[in-house]
Image (cartoon, rainbow, N blue to C red):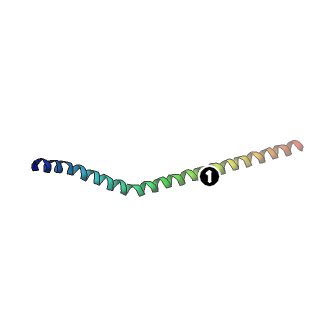
Amino acid sequence: MADNTNADRFASEPQRRIAAATAMGMNALKPMMHFQVSMLRMWADSIERLEASYEKKLEETATSAEDRSDKDRAA
């Protein structure tokens, strides 16, 4: 009986070690993943701001072109 108990304990010991190592690895990766996600959010925000700025400049250019054509017609 005692031999079977020890055999079962030793058989599950590598699984515990692997599970513990995996948990430690995931805990170590968590801050890095949070950092990468925050960098991606900042990158996406920058792209959205660039797009808004581009659209605004495009509208200003279109408006000024229309104003010039109106002035040319009036002249």
Direction from residue 19 to residue 54 in the image, left or right: right
Report the front residue among 71 and 15: 15
Residue at position x 45%, y 55% from top?
34
Locate residue 6, reporting x and y percent.
Answer: 13, 51
Mark 1, Cα crowd under 10 Å, few <14 / some 14-19 / many 20+, is: few
Locate residue 54, reporting x and y percent.
Answer: 66, 49
Q: Which residue is mark 1?
A: 49
Residue at position x 48%, y 52% from top?
37
The count of marks equals 1
Q: Secondary structure at mark 1?
A: helix
Locate residue 29, reporting x and y percent.
Answer: 38, 55
Report the front residue among 59 and 9: 9
Locate residue 40, reporting x and y percent.
Answer: 50, 52
What residue occupies the far right of the structure in this picture? 75
Q: Amino acid at mark 1?
A: Arg
Direction from residue 37 to residue 28 in the image, left or right: left
Direction from residue 43 to residue 10 in the image, left or right: left
What residue occupies the far front of the structure in this picture? 1
Report the front residue among 48 and 34: 34
Q: Classify residue 75 by image quadrant.
A: top right
Q: Is residue 27 above or below residue 71?
A: below
Residue at position x 20%, y 49% from top?
12
Q: Classify residue 73 by image quadrant.
A: top right
